[in-house]
Image: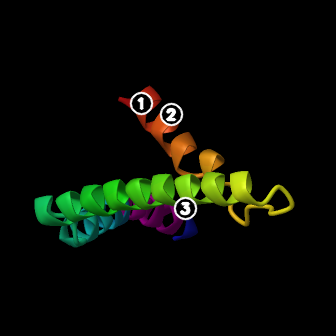
Amino acid sequence: MEDIFVPLIAITSIFIGLPWLILHYVSQWKRAPKITEEDERMLDEMYNLARRLEDRLNTVERIVAADNPDWKPGLNAPQSLHQIDRTQSRSN
């Protein structure tokens, strides 16, 4: 009896259990929310706005640093968003 029982469970799990498990997670993946074109456009606008604000902040920091040599900038901006630009241009 045990000679039949173990292979029967193994075959059942391979041909029924494994495909069911794979199909279950594929259907879960397809039901997951996706980013829409509107969301993508909004992210691009927010990125462009952040980049412009960072440029403005750098300009203000340069002006203040020129007027007051003891002043130290609080944000190291040239390294933050501009690194993202380089990594995005490599992936495209």
Which label sits in the foreground, 3 or 1? 1
Tell me whether the residue at label 1 lies in contact with that at label 2, contact meaning CB atoms closer than 8 angstroms: yes
Instruction: Provide the residue span drawn in magenta.
Output: 3-13
Tell me the residue at 80%/63% (across/down): 71
- CA gap between label 3 and label 2 equals 62 Å
Q: Which residue, given by chain and number where applicable, does mark 2 sit on?
A: 86
Does dot 2 land on a helix, a strand or a loop? helix
Q: Residue at x 43, y 37 (%)?
A: 88
The amino acid type, in three-letter code, at marker 2 is Arg
Image quadrant in which the C terminus is located: top left
Q: Give the distance between the C-alpha atoms of the residues marked 1 and 2, in whole angstroms.
A: 5 Å
Query: Cα distance, mark 3 to mark 1?
Result: 61 Å
- What's the amino acid at mark 3? Asp
Q: Image point 39% across, 55% down: which residue?
A: 52
Q: Is residue 19 magenta?
A: no
Of callouts 3 and 2, which one flags the residue occurring earlier in the amino acid sequence?
A: 3
Picture quadrant of residue 36: bottom left
Task: Residue 37 in the image: state x and y as whole percent.
Answer: 13, 58
Vertical position of residue 7 compared to residue 32: above or below: above
Q: Are marks 3 and 1 in contact (CB under 8 Å)?
A: no
Q: Please give the residue where the numbered disc 1 appears in the rendered image.
A: 89
In the image, 15 versus 55, the foreground residue is: 55
Q: Residue at x 62, y 55 (%)?
A: 63
Within 10 Å of the Cα at label 2, are there few (<14), some (14-19), or many (20+) other Cα atoms?
few
Residue matched to label 3: 3
- Is 14 situated left or right of 3 in this image? left
In the displayed structure, 17 sits above or below 48; it is: below
